[in-house]
Image (tube, grey):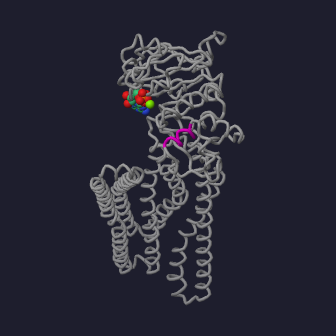
Amino acid sequence: MKTILGYLRPHAPRVAVGITIKFTAAVLELLLPLLLAHIIDDCVPARDLPGVYRAGGLMLVMAFGAAFCNITANRMAAWVSMDMTRQLRRDLYERTLLLSQAQLDRFSVSSIVSRLTNDTYNVHQMFDKIQRGGIRAPMLVLGGLALTFLQAPPLALVQLAVCSATFFAIWLVTRQGIPRYTRAQEAVDTVVRVLRENASGVRVVKALACQGRERERFTAASRASKEAEETAGRVMAAANPLSDFLLNLGLVLVVLAGALLVDRGRMASGQIVAFLSYFTLIQTATLGLAKLFVKFSKGAASARRIEEVLLAPEDQRVRLPENPDRPGPELGMEHVSFSYLGVEQDLDGASFSLNKGETLGILGPTGSGKTTLISLLLRIYDADGGVVRVGGRDVTALSREDLRGRFGVVFQNEALLNDSVYENISFLRRLPREDVIAAARTAQAWEFIEALPEGLDARLDIRGANLSGGQRQRLLIARALAARPGILILDSADSALDYRTAAALHAAIRRDFPGVTLVVISERVASLRDADRILVLEEGAITAQGTHGELLESCGRYRRMAELQMGGLRA
Ligand code: ADP
Ligand code: MG
């Protein structure tokens, strides 16, 4: 909460002015019933008409004054809380961009999204409501009670009792209601998720004829949402009638007790009217106060969730290199181990090295750690042990920009933007069109781009749905090539390409990017056979490495793969 409160500091002057205005308004509101009592008890019995006009006029001016003050202060509160929430959201977003992948995994992306949206909204609401009611409500309650105590302690005691009952009743009901609304919100999230999965996987759903099952899944989610909403509604339904009942009960009690006092000549009737006004004022303020507490607890919980992200320590520091002049391989690992969750080793004792301009091939079944290995080269994750080298240096000694600037990467399942072909290849880097075209040519994508009605300016559907899988893949390869990286990583980038296109692609990369260091992950021996070094990965361990020829001799698994795919073709 301390960090979040810090966001109020720059607005302290505006908050102070707002509080002063609210204070003035509350004083005006508290004085109104006194004037009313004065009119009824002093002016009316004395038939002092000018006195009635004077006091009435003054009341009118004060009522207007209070309304004007409250409106002005509320506007200022809205203004301040909007400004500070905007700053908070911006900082949170920037911090999110700097989180390491390991931290993102830990928070989960959907939780980050809800922290950026829901939680900042709750904090906004909290600050807004506190500024609006945080001064006014307690002042009206305490001031009202104090003024009534001065005049007739027994009546004030009745008010105090009813007020306390109201506060606890409303506070209890809302406190019960809020978590139920949260659950209802989560149930709606589930419905949306099921819908989204169905909509994006509609082809598979149809192809596998699972409409029936999916319908059941949706019905279940939708029913859960309805039930959660009902439970929340049932609890909260008590809130308003309960407060109305307590208000009326209080009014009746005040009138009864007041009538007794008047009867015994211990009170004037005007005072009773003033008491009724005070009572309504206090009761409404109490209600506001109870709701304010709930808003506050909700906002405080959200503030904690935001602070978790804001205060997350930077876990990928850049160290000074111990010996910057020591030459090393362009790419390499020395006894590198890594685990995502700390349960099993996802990469275990990996060692290899590759010189500048050479090609590294990586072969292994799904889940063997191929993507993990390149994630460590890119320092998306930090190794638990061992040294990862890029450009001869320990990756932990390279700045983020220096490291990432060396690579061009195509990941598996990467997404295209709902934008032009040019933007998809240039990808926010504003590359010259010639470079984009050259990259598209190398990636074997130019032929089909040229055939599109608007060529490079043709628009892609969401996720590139108007392209074939192979076309999407070639666009992504063009994107990786377009900035002419020193190191190019293709993670299963040829999976949707036919053999001829894949071969043409590899030949074109070698021809057009002669100095590039290439890392190719593929299920196809044909895509890897020309590599200077091939790693065979199994369950996170490099079980064999060498050239195509060497592996045919030494690695039974590699030989079997080669024979299966290439019909026993030898190097
Ligand atoms: P490959 O690319 O060879 O198919 P990966 O490198 O993606 O395999 O995965 C290697 C292992 O690490 C698998 O067992 C996979 O389940 C696990 N893994 C991959 N990504 C994560 C992640 N973000 N969190 C936890 N485990 C992961
Ligand atoms: Mg993979």
Q: Is residue 323 visible?
A: yes
Residue 261 percent across, percent down from the top left: 37, 76
Quadrant hosting residue 96: top right
Residue 164 percent across, percent down from the top left: 37, 61
Q: Which residues are magenta?
A: 469-476
- Number of marks drawn: 0
Most foreground residue, 24 or 37: 24
Quadrant of the rendered image holding ligand 1: top left
Residue 381 percent across, percent down from the top left: 50, 27
Vertical position of residue 417 compared to residue 547: above or below: below
Residue 520 percent across, percent down from the top left: 52, 26
Vertical position of residue 221 compared to residue 38: above or below: above
Tell me: 243 left or right of 446.
left
**Overall secondary structure of the magenta section:** helix
Q: Residue at x 52, y 39 (%)?
A: 473
Tell me: 157 left or right of 377.
left
Q: Residue at x 43, y 70 (%)?
A: 279
Tell me: 242 left or right of 518.
left
Quadrant hosting residue 167: bottom left
Vertical position of residue 167 compared to residue 310: above or below: below
